Amino acid sequence: MARRLLPRMQDARSRRLLGRLLAILVIAFVVSAALGRWAVVRRSSEASITIVATLPQLGSSYEQSPTGTTIRYTFQAGGRVFAGSAFRPWLDVSEQHPKVCFAPENPEDHLLVEGDYRCGV
């Protein structure tokens, strides 16, 4: 009889442990989503960019490198000029009408996006 109770007790422990792990995963997911949303909202201002240089990169399945362009750019915010560089999977950069979304209190916190992207939404 003791042998029959042992598997049930272990099963109950396993279910409790599994429930706790699932709760931790759900909490981690919710916190991660909230932090990601906060990162988007804080970059609520936008500015047009001046492209300084572009470096196209043709992808290679052998080297597992993506196709796109490294873009060096500048933008103005608060009377100052900021510089940035980003890789995007665009071959025709001008067709994307790129701009930056930035945090008004810290323009160095910026992200290069397509022209039709809505900043801070």
Image (cartoon, rainbow, N blue to C red):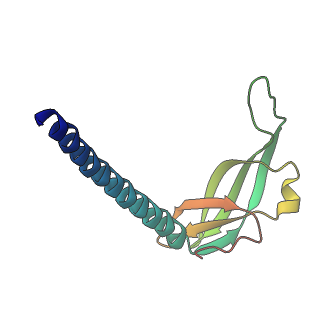
Instruction: Classify residue 101 by image quadrant.
Output: bottom right
**Spot occupied by residue 111 in the image (x, y as percentages of width and height):** 62, 60
Camera-nearest residue between 80 and 98: 98
Quadrant of the snapshot with the N terminus: top left
Which residue is at a point 54% across and 68% down the rendered structure image?
Answer: 40
Q: Residue furthest top?
A: 62
> Is residue 70 depicted above or below 97 in this figure?
above
Camera-nearest residue between 72 and 3: 3
**Spot occupied by residue 42 in the image (x, y as percentages of width and height):** 50, 71
Which residue is at a point 38% across and 53% down the rendered structure image?
Answer: 25
**Spot occupied by residue 79 in the image (x, y as percentages of width and height):** 59, 72
Labels in figure, total? 0
Which residue is at a point 81% across and 29% down the rendered structure image?
Answer: 60
Left/right placement of residue 20 relative to residue 101 reads left
Residue 103 visible to the viewer: no
> Is residue 20 depicted above or below 6 in this figure?
below
Q: Residue furthest left?
A: 2
Q: Residue furthest front?
A: 1
Left/right placement of residue 87 relative to residue 26 reads right
Which residue is at a point 76% across and 63% down the rendered structure image?
Answer: 98
Quadrant of the snapshot with the C terminus: bottom right
Instruction: Classify residue 66 by image quadrant.
Output: top right
Left/right placement of residue 68 relative to residue 72 reads right
> Is residue 56 depicted above or below 98 in this figure?
above
Left/right placement of residue 56 relative to residue 41 reads right
Instruction: Classify residue 4 by image quadrant.
Output: top left
Residue 5 visible to the viewer: yes
Camera-nearest residue between 44 and 26: 26
